[in-house]
Amino acid sequence: MPENLLGNEVLHLLLVNDGQDLAQMQLEESLKSLYAKWLIEPVVAVGIKAGEDRLQEYGVANQLDFKKRGSKSHLYTDFVLNELLPFLQKEIGKPINGKKAFAGFSLGGLTAFDVAWNHSDIFDVVGVFSGSFWWRRKDLSEGYTDSDRILHQMIADSKGKPNLKFWLMTGTEDEKADRNQNFIIDSIDDTIDVIKELVKKGYQRPDDIFYYEMVGGKHDVPTWGRAFPKFLEWAFAKRTSF
């Protein structure tokens, strides 16, 4: 972040899962461009590099999927909350008095959603790009139904309505799978169903939920890189003063 922006009144924080991909996505260049156009407020963006045990560290905390993945997701959540955030606050040396956002791609997006949903006292914004909302308790060959999707059920079972805003993105070429044969790929179906569960909780579109379906978008870093500047502008838009 440009040094001269640190003196501004409001400072936001963005955590991003799979941070090893941010250089390829040209995040730094996107931030510089948005600052130059005076479109966003100052934000400290932190990429969290995924470890070799990504499939165990990511997921929905304390709820394994049908392949027993996500067994360390509660430990990852603990790391973010109790190690990373205090470290960042000390390193930044200034109060993070703006929004705290958590974003991610694919399984990293599912994880960001889960952490923010269950810790809305800390986070304000969720960004999910091609989220692995298919994450489920049963395989398709084991009598799967839509109620086996873990995150959807987590939302439905949660008491209350966390104070969050959501950016959800998919691409029309995110995948080929269409388990219910409705001519809509599963990634879009699963994301739309997340939105439906959020609306049932009382969230409203577009105030609380922004959905972006990228025509031609794929399940890859270049697609997410093209979408990310729009997320930044949505999440950290510069307030107009008169």
Image (cartoon, grey):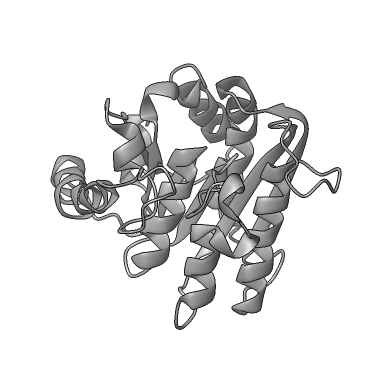
Residue 216, relative to residue 61: is it above or below?
above
Query: Toward the viewer: 59 or 41?
Result: 59
Residue 197, relative to residue 189: is it above or below?
below
Residue farthest to the front, as pictured: 142
Residue 54, relative to residue 124: is it above or below?
above
**Is residue 101 toward the left or the right of residue 37 in the image?**
left
Q: Can residue 53 be seen in this view?
A: yes
Task: Please tell me which residue is depicted at 63% across the width and 69% down the height of the picture.
Answer: 197
Residue 18 x/y as whole percent: 39, 31
Q: In which quarter of the image is the C terminus?
A: bottom right
Residue farthest to the top, as pictured: 24
Query: Toward the viewer: 150 or 100?
Result: 150
Residue 89 x/y as whole percent: 19, 49
Residue farthest to the right, as pictured: 183
Q: Is residue 237 visible?
A: no
Query: Toward the viewer: 162 or 51?
Result: 51
**Is residue 46 toward the left or the right of residue 81 in the image?**
right
Task: Please tell me which residue is depicted at 69% across the width and 32% down the height of the picture.
Answer: 174
Task: Tell me the quarter of the picture where residue 82 sits.
Answer: bottom left
Residue 52 x/y as whole percent: 27, 25
